[in-house]
Image (tube, rainbow, N blue to C red):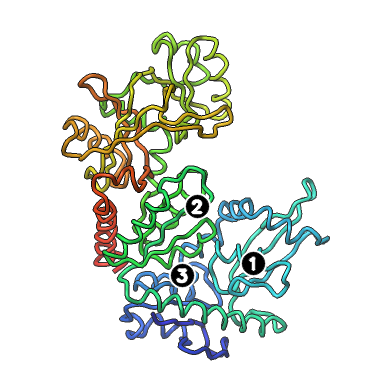
Amino acid sequence: MKVLIVVNDPKDWPLAISEVEIVPARAYLTDAAYAEMTSARVFNLCKSYRYQSTGYYVSLLAAARGHKPLPDVATIQDFKTQAIIRIASDDLDQIIQQSLGQIKSPEFVVSIYFGHNVAKRHEKLAQQLFKIFQAPFLRASFSHNEKDGKWQLAGITPIAASDIPEDHRDFAVEMAREYFKGRHRIFHRRRTARYDLAILHDPAEAEVPSNAKGLQRMVKAAEAVGFATEFIQKDDYGRLAEFDALFIRETTNVLHHTYRFARRGVAEGLVVIDDPESILRCTNKVFLAEILTRHRIPIPKTRIVHQGNWQQFAAELGFPCVLKKPDSSFSQGVVKVENEAELARELPALLQKSELVIAQEFMPTTFDWRVGVFDGQPLFACKYFMASKHWQIIKRDSAGRKLTDGEAETLPVEHCPPGLIKLALKASALIGDGLYGVDIKQVGNRFYLVEINDNPNIDAGVEDRVLKDELYLRLMRVFARRVDERKGGGLWA
């Protein structure tokens, strides 16, 4: 992959680096040779990235040409978005306080050169900010809050090569040289693959959507269909423009970095599973209850509860009934109440956290069906049995820690009741064409949809028990087809 440093004037960048080409911005925008270049990594060091400026168009056209710009247009927008600045400040709060705790002035500026700062004590902070806001040279401004005594990120802006202070220039040049040496090895490793796939995961997550063996089988399948695959984590947010597709294998939530990754990935033109709309819809059970009811999908008797009706709904549902936080997952935030006294104790605590809560009639069954659906097609079908002497698949202690879970049985989709598969496909189509786990209860010959999960479990030894490696190949073939379609036409041609 060709590496280009794009500057307004080549004199702004006096350093010669092996296998790195210095390109005037005007030439990059207008010269047909760059427009026809099939792949390139573009380091945009223009003086300004303001809207419709030369620097802005360098990153915009780089994306349109299928090049990999740094910064990309999404990062340029992030510089201007206070919500993103606040999120970054909150995410890095501990590192910010450690880095700046001894500083006495009310304001402070940290200059960042390819993820490094001239002062070693700010090195970790510089690295983390570079991972979030990926631009070659950055200037981060911090303010000290007198009320709580804490430092906060107030703003972050890119620095043009020509604006680097004279006493920082040698350091900036050396950091650039080291960065390009490291990047060259990565480019060489990926050169044989058609596309790049990022798998977002958290090795420290207690209950993961895919176990380690399942993740490795995904990598094997991805490589078989032409992807170079890399596992990324939360602090790799700024690197998304390097990839063509993103597969989120962390538990998702709207108030979580997984949702920001999905949004950013879509903005960058990546194929993203789970897409942000699916996360938004599936992680809120109030939305699901409303849309399933409106489309006459059979569900357990359900009520949306709020402060104004919580004393009346119990008579309609009867006891026991089940209360659910709108964003509950992995059987957490779900409570069974046996009588009025338990209802009066449990419900107010849920209503303190959410204006609306879901209440459902209790349907006792020995197992729940889950049908995995991807790209509008059934992928797997499992029976998840209730944990021993418990009413849920997962049994937890009072602190929410998992004690045990039930057994699982995976069946060939073609051996499952047709009504089960038909219901799963009809319901998941209301959400989108992503990857979903559709949970269904069977009472006699009737099926009732309980919920639709984005980011369903795909574990080696469970969901893949029938299809084995073919399950992962089916996943990756869809990724590859969608990337092909995106690269073959439209905005990203």
122 in relation to 42, above or below: above
Query: What is the distance, in whole Å, between disc 1 and disc 2 at their CAs?
Result: 22 Å
Please tell me whether mark 3 or mark 2 is closer to you in this view. 2
Q: Name the amino acid type tagged 3.
A: Gln
Secondary structure beneath dot 3 equals: loop
Residue 361 position, x and y percent, is: 38, 17
Q: Quadrant of residue 57?
A: bottom left
Which amino acid type is shown beneath numbered disc 1? Ala
The residue lying toward the viewer, choosing from 184 and 404, is: 404
Name the disc covering residue 215, or none: none
Distance Cα–Cα, label 3 vs label 2 = 38 Å
Which image quadrant is residue 319 in?
A: top left
What secondary structure is found at the residue carrying circle 1? helix
Mark 1 vs mark 3: give the one in front.
1
Work out how far the residue at label 1 is from the one at label 3, CA to CA, in angstroms.
28 Å
Q: How many marks?
A: 3
* 248 relative to 188, above or below: above
Instruction: Indicate which disc, 1 or 2, sits on the residue closer to the N terminus.
Output: 1
Residue bearing mark 3? 52
Query: Which residue has dot 1 on it?
Result: 126
Q: Is residue 147 above or below residue 386?
A: below
Q: Percent from the top left, x then y, of residue 94? A: 68, 53
Image quarter of the N terminus:
bottom left
**Residue to which mark 2 is pinned:** 202
Locate the C terminus by quadrant: bottom left
Say which of 189 and 340 sits in front. Answer: 189
Q: Earlier in the sequence, mark 1 or mark 3?
A: 3
Q: Amino acid at mark 2?
A: Asp
Task: Looking at the picture, tell me which residue is in the foreground, 211 or 23.
Answer: 211
Label 2 crowd bin: few (<14), some (14–19), many (20+), radius 10 Å:
some
Q: Looking at the rendering, which quadrant does residue 13 occupy? A: bottom right
Question: Which comes before the other along the chain, label 3 or label 2?
Answer: 3
